[in-house]
Amino acid sequence: MKITTGRGVIMKYSVRSTYHLVYSKMWDFDRKLVYYGIAEVLFSAITPLVGVFMPSLIIACLEQQAGVQTLVLVCLSAFLVYGVINGIQTFLENRSSTQFILYRLKKFWSEMFRSTITRDYQNVEDYKTQIQIAKTEECLSTNDHGLEGFCHHNIKLAVNLLGLTLYSLVIGTTNIQLIGLLLGLSVIQYFIYRYAWKKEAATMEESGQIVRSIWYLHKETYNVATGKDIRLYGMRAWMAEFYRSLIRRLEKIEGKVRSAYFLYDMAGIFIQAVRDLAAYSWLILSLMQGMSIAQFVFLLGVISGFSTWFSTISEMISLLSNDLMRIGYYRDYTESEVVHAKPAESQAAAESMTITFEHVSFQYDQQRKVLDDFNLTIPAGQKVALVGINGAGKTTLVKLLCGLYRPDSGRILLNDRELTEDNREAFQKQLAVVFQDAMIMSVTIAENISGKNLEATDCGKVIEVLKRANLWEKVSRLPLQEKTYLGKDLNTDGIQLSGGEVQRLILARALYKEAKMLILDEPTAALDAIAESEMYKMVNDLVGDHTALFISHRLSSTQFCDRILFLENGVIVEDGTHEELMKRKGKYAKMFEVQSQYYQEGGEVYEFENSLAGNL
Ligand SMILES: Nc1ncnc2c1ncn2[C@@H]1O[C@H](COP(=O)(O)OP(=O)(O)OP(=O)(O)O)[C@@H](O)[C@H]1O
């Protein structure tokens, strides 16, 4: 059920279902949190009443001309009772503050972490999911709003409701008309507050978007990768102006909201004046008609505290609407129907793999189809090169093959078995893929290679693959060798590898996996042409009988392959060995000839640019 909480703010989930979700999880997490919460409500509502009652008690003793001893005893007892109640209330408040943080982190953050890490790659890559993640963080990153705010605000709401009820009973037993007037005025004040809140709620989506953009810009200012371009391409002024324009937009929105709250504040002052006039007139009149001073002081305290209970209730209802909206973001993300990873089936790994694409079509969003009715068979053990100009669809094809994307139509078969959600994890275990943008984590070299913690890593095997990837010479010279940290995020002694060294490390990771199929999606961009060619040949020797797919823009690096596929706009336009394609004098031969001009010229080796391929 959708519920409107303010102009333009629609909540997808019923209030009841969100309450049920948060409190049933809390019950599972630690039921003491609920018990202590109830106790906090009781003590927080009683404390002010006791505070108001104390002076009137002392005055009553004076009025009745009690002896000094009795007066001292009453005072001490009153202070003791007040101190104990106040102390318990403070303890409960502090306890819930820390416990709600733990509840948010242990229960909700971990659920979000699990939901992200296990979900389909295609879904995580989607920009809509990225926005959902940013919004979910809004629900889980602060103590005052979203999930944790919800827990605190509910306690405060309950305290104020109970306090209001107690105070209404006290006043109501003395003057029923007065309580009617006080409640009526408070209701008017509440509706004016709702008006201001609705103004604010109507801007929340837009201001949330602006705040996210501001955070994005902030992030880019300390992002090491973009930092270079910002300085070298003189982007500072442009970014600063962009930042200022966002702040200006936020200021404008805030201005509108502030003026609505100003109206509320003004109305509040007026209502307060009317309320005080009525209440104090009655009190003074009652005093003149014989009310005791003790009762007068007590009712004075109760009446002046009455409006605070009510205005806090209005405030809490508005804050809770905001919290509910943010919890809705969290629910959108964690309850959305996405494919989550299934544990790998235990099945015997095949020695080598035959890959078949059967009428596969795929497109990103509403763009043109990258692959349209695509067919291809790679027999087991074949070494295939996939070449083509930029944007031809090579990486997309690899991601489909790895199960990172799902075809829109058609099937991908692995040894005659269709790749599905159920066997995807099992299949991925048999694959080693080296992408252009491979991930290096700020952990040790050995952990980066094995993908496990040090205790579970076979360091002997790590050294062996580092040797095979021509990186051991460098690593062996480091004081901690394969146990050296990469980057300084987790260890200040961490080292920085060069682009080419990172790519060798990624290759070592692929070799460590001992997969049945190896895919190299141009991981060698940081290597020179000769080093790349040598690495591809070396990998070819290492994979033995296993199937391998090599992607490169440097055609000389892949000419050794059993088969070369020339991809253009998602279609294989040429298919054969290097010799066959050269004889055919088609697109491949033309590209090869252009590139080869840049190799041996006057006995010197020249580097050629990847972008050259795109010019063909
Ligand atoms: N995540 C994505 N979202 C939307 N479009 C994408 C995405 N990735 C790639 N594309 C588009 O799909 C097409 C094929 O891209 P792909 O990366 O598969 O080509 P490629 O042959 O690997 O290119 P290159 O040689 O430049 O790496 C391109 O037009 C690209 O703009």
Image (cartoon, rainbow, N blue to C red):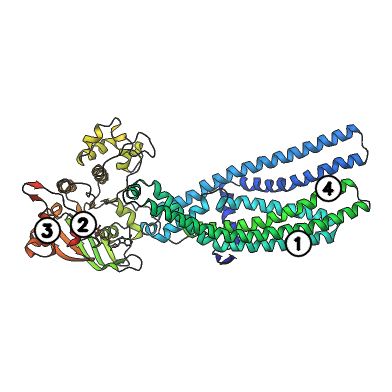
Within-10-Å neighbours for mark 1: few <14, some 14–19, many 20+: some
* Nearer to us: label 1 or label 4: 1
Which numbered dot is residue 594?
3
Disc 1 to disc 4: CB gap under 8 Å: no
Secondary structure under badge 3? helix
Q: Quadrant of residue 386?
A: bottom left
Percent of width and height locating residue 473: 21, 35
Q: Amino acid at mark 4?
A: Phe
Percent of width and height locating residue 305: 76, 51
The mark nearer the N terminus, 2 or 1, is: 1
Q: In the picture provided, is 601 more to the left or to the right than 155?
A: left
The mark nearer the N terminus, 3 or 2, is: 3
- Tell me which residue sits at (76%, 63%) in the image: 184
Q: Amino acid at mark 3?
A: Val
Q: Amino acid at mark 1?
A: Leu
The mark nearer the N terminus, 1 or 3, is: 1
Residue at which label 1 appears: 185
Residue 529 can be seen in this image: yes
Residue at which label 2 appears: 611
Secondary structure under badge 2? helix
Marks 3 and 2, how far apart in space? Answer: 12 Å
Residue at which label 4 appears: 298
- Tell me which residue sits at (13%, 60%) in the image: 591
Q: Amino acid at mark 2?
A: Ser
Percent of width and height locating residue 12: 54, 64
Residue 378 can be seen in this image: no
The mark nearer the N terminus, 1 or 4, is: 1
Residue toward you, 77 or 453: 77
